[in-house]
Amino acid sequence: MRPIDLTRIELPLQNEQGKLKVFDALRKKWIILTPEEHVRQSLIAYMIKELHYPAALIAVEKQILINNRSKRFDIVVFNSNHQPWMLVECKSPEVDITDKTLHQLLVYHRSLNCRYWMLSNGHQHFCADASLPNQITWLQQLPAYNL
């Protein structure tokens, strides 16, 4: 996949009682800036500012039920019909993208059934077209949002 440059993304930050926080414009609140949250917020900003994905159709950290257990996905982008279109799993930069990471995404995918998958740790990015379940195609770049 062509490298995604997240270094140009500027996030709104504040220091509150010794804790660095980032403003999540989608959830409309300040969140503690963990390494994983930095990746998540940078990707959201990149999708909105660089790729023009509609912010109103992006969900962050929402609860879903999987095998009667509560889980939270990182990012889901919906199409114009409000159907899940892209599922994104974020990891901290020090966490390598592995089969284990892919397995976690696939567990969420069973419940959400998105056309595209994305795995990222901020410097490794992998995106796949999963529209044909028996023929997953790894992409060189994120798909354009033209739905």
Image: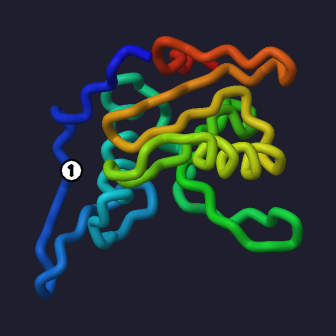
Left or right relative to 18: residue 143: right
Residue 12 lies, with reference to residue 143, above or below; the image says below
For this orientation, the residue located farthest to the bottom is 17
61 up-or-down from 131: above or below? below
Q: Which residue is depicted at the point 46% across and 15% down?
A: 141
Instruction: Tell me the amino acid under the disc marked 1.
Output: Leu
Residue on which the image places disc 1: 11
Q: Residue 75: x, y in percent?
A: 54, 48
Q: Quadrant of residue 118?
A: top right
Q: Residue at the location (80% across, 66% down)?
A: 65
x, y percent for residue 61: 55, 61
Q: In the picture, residue 50 is in which quadrant?
A: top left
Tell me: 80 left or right of 4.
right
Q: Is residue 97 above or below residue 34?
A: above
Q: Residue at x 68, y 14 (%)?
A: 137
Q: Residue at x 38, y 14 (%)?
A: 2
x, y percentage for residue 52? 41, 25
